[in-house]
Amino acid sequence: MAEKGIPMESKAKQDIVRNILNSDNDSLTERERKVIKHYKEHVPISRNTNKVFDENLTFGQRLADKVASFGGSWTFIILFGVILLSWVVLNSIILVRYNKAFDPYPYILLNLFLSTLASIQAPVILMSQSRQALKDRLDAEHDYEVNLKAELEILGLHQKVDEIRESKWADLILMQQEQIRMLTQLVEKNEVRE
């Protein structure tokens, strides 16, 4: 039942792989070869891509992610609003009482701080978003691998169920033939008695 020294189960898996991917091993991508290897060896392909991705982050990348996370939170918005309001109120009170303020209206120093914050925060957030897009791409690739392996496994199960069903049909036909033979014998015996 083996072809060229290949066990039947492995041969069946190769047929399944050829059928689903419509190609031979030479034209497959590295990812597809990896999936097939895991499929043939009955090894899980699932892994925690978040853990793998996070382990490879540098200090700067982690810091950028934390800054982006804080910069996009309600805590930041509320804190920033309180600081801006305090700045304006404090400067206005000092200006009215003492006719002297460290940043008088139109608050040019405040505008400089806001511009500086925006010019620093924007690239940091973009770096974090680029990394998140890379992470999403890795997740999508991993999902493809898992889905491909699951599809191969399902096709393998279908093939096994079909083989079992065919063998049951063969058994059923043999049983029917035996029953027909026995009925024929009974009919012949009955005819001989009459």
Image (cartoon, grey):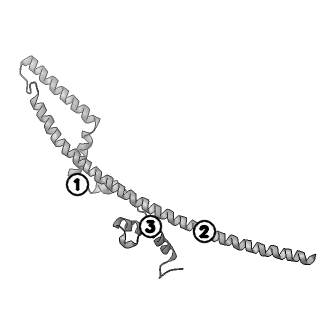
- 29 lies left or right of 72: right
- 157 lies left or right of 109: right
Residue type at mark 2: give it.
Ile
Compared with 92, 143 (above or below) is: below
Determine the secondary structure under disc 3: helix
Say which label, 2 or 3, has the lower sequence index: 3
Say which label, 1 or 2, has the lower sequence index: 1
Say which label, 3 or 1, has the lower sequence index: 3
Determine the secondary structure under disc 1: loop
The residue beneath circle 2 is 164
The residue beneath circle 1 is 58
Image point 22% across, 54% down: which residue?
58
> Observer-nearest residue: 80 or 159?
159
Q: Is residue 178 visible?
A: yes
The residue beneath circle 3 is 39
- Mark 3: few/some/many CA within 10 Å (<14, 14-19, 20+): some
Residue type at mark 3: give it.
Tyr
x, y (%) of residue 14?
A: 46, 72
Residue type at mark 1: give it.
Thr
Image point 29% across, 56% down: which residue?
55
Q: Answer yes or no: do the residues labelled 3 and 1 have beta carbons within 8 Å? A: no
Determine the secondary structure under disc 2: helix
Residue at mark 3 to residue at mark 1: CA–CA distance: 34 Å
x, y (%) of residue 119?
A: 15, 41
- 142 lies left or right of 157: left
- Mark 1: few/some/many CA within 10 Å (<14, 14-19, 20+): few
Q: Which mark is residue 178?
A: none
Q: Nearer the viewer, mark 3 or mark 1?
A: 3
- 14 lies left or right of 123: right
The image quadrant that residue 167 belongs to is bottom right
